[in-house]
Amino acid sequence: MAPHDDFDLLTGRDELTGYRFGTGAAEHLFCRRCGVKSFYQPRSHPEAWSINANCLDEMPEFAIEPFDGRNWERAKANLDAQD
């Protein structure tokens, strides 16, 4: 996750296309050429972008946190309780 203020897309904006699933709260951005979802605006973190680490030049160290998307409201409440 990268806060909006810490993320700058330097090139390629015109190569992205967006899609909103279900509630429409999250905006998923895909490459028009290859279909990879490079990053998206998650419903769970409206102040940050979720970045596909495989799209970065260098792989950062990070922890994977499970999130139960089927039970979104409960999973979001559990996530908020951890902060």
Image (cartoon, rainbow, N blue to C red):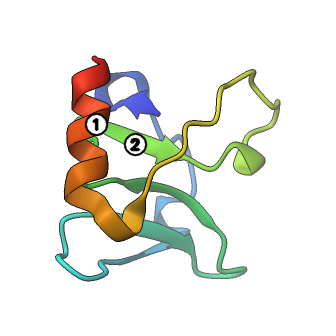
Please say if 70 is above or below 65: below
Question: Residue 77: image x %, image y %?
Answer: 20, 40
Q: Compare residues 37 and 43 and report the one nearer the observer.
A: 43
- In the image, taking residue 70 as reference, residue 33 lies left or right, namely right
Query: In terms of image quadrants, where is residue 4?
Result: top left
Query: In terms of image quadrants, where is residue 53?
Result: top right
Q: Residue at x 28, y 41 (%)?
A: 45
- Residue 46 appearing in the image: no
Task: Give the CA separation, mark 2 to mark 1.
Answer: 20 Å
- Residue 23 appearing in the image: yes
Task: Identify the residue under disc 2.
Answer: 49
Q: Residue at x 31, y 21 (%)?
A: 82
Question: Residue 13: image x %, image y %?
Answer: 47, 60
Number of numbered labels in the structure image = 2
- Mark 1: which amino acid? Asn
Task: Identify the residue under disc 1.
Answer: 78
Q: Compare residues 17 and 19 and report the one nearer the observer.
A: 19
Q: Are marks 2 and 1 in contact (CB under 8 Å)?
A: no
Q: Is mark 1 on a helix, strand or loop?
A: helix
Please say if 48 is above or below 5: below
- Mark 2: which amino acid? Trp
Q: Residue furthest right?
A: 58
- In the image, taking residue 64 as reference, residue 78 lies left or right, namely left
Query: In terms of image quadrants, where is residue 40?
Result: bottom left
Structural crowding at the residue carrying mark 1, measured as other residues with C-alpha within 10 Å and reported as few (<14), some (14–19) or many (≥20): few
Q: Which residue is drawn at 53% across and 72% down?
A: 30
Question: Residue 2: image x %, image y %?
Answer: 44, 30
- In the image, taking residue 35 as reference, residue 5 lies left or right, namely left
